[in-house]
Amino acid sequence: MRLPVVLVRGKNSFLVEKFEGVLHTHHGMIDLKELKNKKIGEEVSTHLGVKYRILPFRPLDFFKHFKRGPAPIVPKDIGAIIVYTGLSPDSLIFDAGTGTGMVAAYLAHFNKFGEVVTVEKREDFAKIAKNNFKLAGLKNVHQIVGDALEVADGFKREFDLAVIDMKEDVAFVPKAKKILIAGGCLAVYNPYIEAAREVYEAMVKEGFQEVEAFEIIKVDLDIKRIGTRTSTKVWHTGYIVIGRNVV
């Protein structure tokens, strides 16, 4: 069996990176050595006899099990960026503001024939991201520790997509104009609506076309025996501004 794997029971899941030691769960302890003789899809039992299903570690597990640092962009927003920019699987992508690597990991996975260049100013975040990329088995991510505004000056027009999640996002807009190919897209994520407006206006000023700003709302349903209703959770996360480079 290949590592890592995920042990799942209902809403509970645990990431396993080594077949050694003991895993403590709410349903008892699991001797991880037992996994050596198991296959994907089989079950393993705790010492109390409660069974967990063995599943492969997949992209849908990134958000649950990646080590965290700064608050990451959530999957619903990452999905919107991928769809609304028309990401193809052979793209060259510039990712400014790696954080702990959530966005770069998803972009790299769906861009399996291309490459992602991701830049992070903070070394501690970059270190966490590096371990997450290794955990996910991603080999098409190239990390740079530094200021994305300065790093971008070292590239010519060659990127298909630039994804920005950093404080200096407005300042990066003209940089993106220079490094994106004709028809390439810029996607900027920001948790504040005023900042998203500033990005929108900067993109229009720089000549980006088809500029749009929006948010994606995810509404969960509470499904119970007595009936179904909207969950009381608030699912606003941030705002996305996307534009297309016309040279």
Image (spheres, grey):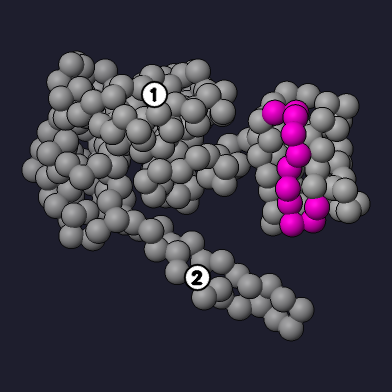
Span shown in magenta: 18-28
Question: Along the line of sight, which residue is nearer the eye, 237 or 79?
Answer: 237
Quarter holding residue 124: top left
Residue picked out by circle 1: 116
Residue 98 visible within the image: yes
- Front residue of this view, candidates 100 and 189: 100
Instruction: Please state if 139 lies on the left or on the right of 38 as rendered.
Output: left
At mark 2, the secondary structure is loop
Q: Position of residue 185 (x, y in %)?
A: 29, 34
Residue at 20 percent across and 29 percent down: it is 147
**Residue at far front of view:** 21
Q: Residue furthest bottom?
A: 226
Which residue is found at the position 51% from the left and 66% from the top?
219
Query: For numbered disc 1, what is the local secondary structure?
Result: strand
Q: Considering only order in the chain, which callout, 1 or 2, is on the residue closer to the N terminus?
A: 1
Looking at the picture, which amino acid does disc 1 mark?
Val
Hey, which quadrant is residue 177 in on the image?
A: top left
Q: Residue furthest right?
A: 49
Instruction: Quarter of the image for the N terminus: give it.
Output: top right
Q: Is residue 152 magenta?
A: no
**Cβ–Cβ under 8 Å for marks 2 and 1:** no
Locate residue 65, reporting x and y percent. Answer: 57, 42
* Distance in Å between CA atoms under marks 2 and 1: 33 Å
Where residue 46 appears, as percent x and y from the top left, is 85, 47
Circle 2 residue = 233
**Tag 2: Cα neighbours inside 10 Å, few (<14), some, or many (≥20)?**
few
Count of labels shown? 2
- Where is 159 relative to 231, above or below? above
Residue 27, magenta (yes or no): yes
- The residue located at (80%, 47%) in the rendering is 29
